Image (cartoon, helix red, strand yellow):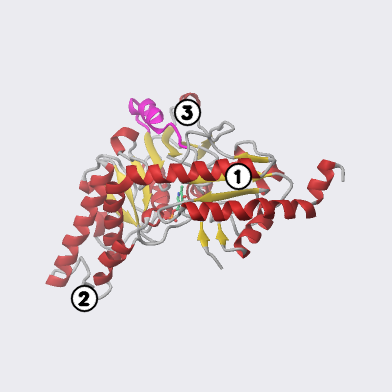
C-alpha cells in the first residue's frame, strides 16, 4: 500500500545529513563536554559550534541560546522561570487560549501558585488583537506569552506589533516559535521578543532537543538544578548528538528556507483548492492568508474527524485529527472551540501538514481518496441524514 505522511507539524523525519552529522557522537565522539580530557574538550567545542549555528539562524548572540529538551521544556522554563523570578514585581501573565498545551498547562500550574492569567480573545481566524493586550496590561503584569504561529490551524500572529507595544514597558515577551523556526524567518530582533522557544524535531532535527532564546539581561529562575552546564541556566549532561543535529538542521533550514516555503505554498494551494472543489460542506479553519505554508486544516460537516482519520489511515494517509497531544483524547480541539467553530464541526476537523518530502503525487493521491471517503462516511452518518431530511 502507498504510504503518505501528511503530519509534518507533529514531527518531521530526520534529515539524512543531520543523521550523518550526529552519528559519530553516538560512537567514537562520546565524551562528556564537562570532562577536561580531550574527549570532553572536543565535544565542548562542537556543542559551542552548534550553539553558534542556532544563534546565527535567529539573529541572536551565542550566549543567548540555552539548550533544552525541546519545545515543552522551553515553554515551561520561560513561563515558570519569569513567574518565579518576578513574583515580587507582579503576579499577572497574559496569553491566548489557543497556545499549545505546553504553555496552557504551565499557566494552569502557575494559577495554582497564585498567579493570575488573562486569556485574550481571538477572532474567528485565531488572530490576537494587540489592542486587547494593551487593555489587559495592569501594573501587576510581568509576562506576555503569544505563539508565533498556531500548530493546529497555522494562523500567524502579529508578533512584531505585540513586541513593539511591550518594548517600552517592563514586561517580558515570550514567543513560542516551535512551528515557525525552520519555515519562516524568525529573527529575535524583528519579533522584539525576550524569550523564544524552539524545537529541533519540527524542522528535520532530532527529537528531544530544542532551545530557549533568552535575551541578554532577561532574568529567569532556574528550573533544573545540578551541575554547571549551560552557564548555570540548565543543569544536566548535554545531549551532544541532539545538539549537533539541532545545529545542523538549523543550518540546512537557513540555507533553503525561501525555496522550501515556495514549494510548500504551491502544494498547499493545490491541496486546499482540490478539497474545496471535490468535497462540499467543508470549511477551512484558520486564517486564509496569514497562515503557515505547510498547514491545511478543514472542518468536514456531518462526519466525525476521527472516522475520517481512521479511514484515511487505513488507506495509507497519515494526518491529524487534532494536535498530536490531543489526538488520543475524544475532546474537540481547544483551538477550534476558541475561534468559535461549533463543537460538532470541531469534531469533524482534520489537519494535513506537508513538508520536505511531500510531492504533487502525494497530494493527487489524497485528492483521489478523500472525496469518496467523505461521501461514504456521510452516507452512514445520522447527522447528514438529519440535514437532508432523508
Ligand atoms: N509548542 C508548539 C506550538 C508545538 O507545536 C509543540 C509541539 O507540537 C510544542 C510546543 C512542544 O514541543 P516539543 O514536542 O519539542 O516538546
Magenta-tinted stretch? 156-171
Cα distance between the residues tagged 2 and 3: 52 Å
Query: Residue 229 has which mark?
Result: none
Residue carrying label 3: 133
Residue at image location 37% in from the left, 32% down from the top:
171
Residue nearest the observer in this picture, 367 or 387: 367
Give the mark nearer the N terminus: 2 vs 3.
Answer: 2
Label 2 CB, ligand 1: below 8 Å? no
Q: Which residue is mark 1?
A: 275
Task: Tell me the quadrant of the picture where the N terminus can be found.
Answer: bottom right
Residue sitting at x 61%, y 40%:
276
Residue drawn at (37%, 47%), measured in percent from left and top?
Answer: 197
Residue 210 x %, y %: 35, 55
Marks 1 and 3, how far apart at CA: 36 Å
Q: Is residue 153 magenta?
A: no
Q: Which residue is mark 2?
A: 28
Amino acid at each position: 500500500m502507498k504510504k503518505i505522511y501528511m503530519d509534518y507539524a507533529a514531527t518531521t523525519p530526520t534529515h539524512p545529513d543531520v543523521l550523518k552529522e550526529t552519528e559519530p557522537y553516538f560512537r567514537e565522539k562520546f565524551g562528556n563536554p564537562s570532562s577536561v580530557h580531550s574527549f570532553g574538550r572536543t565535544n565542548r567545542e562542537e556543542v559551542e559550534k552548534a550553539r553558534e549555528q542556532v544563534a546565527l539562524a535567529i539573529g541572536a548572540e551565542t550566549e543567548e541560546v540555552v539548550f533544552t529538551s525541546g519545545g515543552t521544556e522551553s515553554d515551561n522554563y520561560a513561563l515558570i522561570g519569569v513567574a518565579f523570578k518576578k513574583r515580587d514585581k507582579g503576579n499577572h501573565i497574559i496569553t491566548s487560549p489557543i497556545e499549545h498545551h505546553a504553555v496552557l498547562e504551565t499557566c494552569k500550574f502557575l494559577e495554582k501558585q497564585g498567579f493570575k492569567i488573562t486569556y485574550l480573545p481571538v477572532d474567528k481566524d485565531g488572530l490576537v488583537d494587540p489592542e486587547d493586550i494593551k487593555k489587559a496590561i495592569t501594573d501587576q503584569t510581568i509576562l506576555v506569552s503569544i505563539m508565533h504561529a498556531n500548530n493546529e490551524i497555522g494562523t500567524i500572529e502579529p508578533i512584531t506589533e505585540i513586541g513593539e507595544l511591550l518594548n517600552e514597558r517592563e514586561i517580558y515577551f515570550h514567543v513560542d516559535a516551535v512551528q515557525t523556526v525552520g519555515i519562516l524567518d524568525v529573527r529575535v530582533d524583528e519579533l522584539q521578543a525576550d524569550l523564544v522557544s524552539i524545537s529541533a524535531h519540527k524542522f528535520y532535527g532530532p527529537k528531544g532537543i530544542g532551545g530557549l532564546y533568552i535575551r541578554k539581561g532577561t532574568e529567569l529562575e532556574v528550573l533544573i538544578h545540578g551541575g554547571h552546564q549551560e552557564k548555570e541556566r540548565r543543569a544536566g549532561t548535554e545531549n551532544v548528538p541532539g545538539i549537533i543535529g539541532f545545529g545542523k538542521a538549523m543550518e540546512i533550514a537557513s540555507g533553503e528556507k525561501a525555496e522550501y516555503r515556495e514549494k510548500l505554498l504551491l502544494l498547499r494551494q493545490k491541496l486546499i483548492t482540490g478539497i474545496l472543489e471535490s468535497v462540499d460542506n467543508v470549511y477551512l479553519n484558520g486564517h486564509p492568508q496569514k497562515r503557515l505554508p505547510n498547514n491545511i486544516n478543514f472542518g468536514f460537516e456531518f462526519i466525525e474527524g476521527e472516522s475520517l482519520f481512521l479511514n484515511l489511515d487505513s488507506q495509507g494517509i497519515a494526518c491529524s485529527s487534532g494536535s498530536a497531544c490531543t489526538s488520543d483524547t475524544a475532546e474537540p480541539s481547544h483551538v477550534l472551540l476558541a475561534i468559535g467553530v461549533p463543537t460538532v464541526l470541531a469534531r469533524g476537523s482534520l489537519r494535513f501538514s506537508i513538508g520536505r518530502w511531500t510531492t504533487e503525487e502525494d497530494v493527487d493521491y489524497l485528492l483521489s481518496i478523500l472525496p469518496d471517503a467523505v461521501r461514504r462516511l456521510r452516507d452512514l452518518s445520522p447527522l447528514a441524514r438529519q440535514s437532508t431530511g432523508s
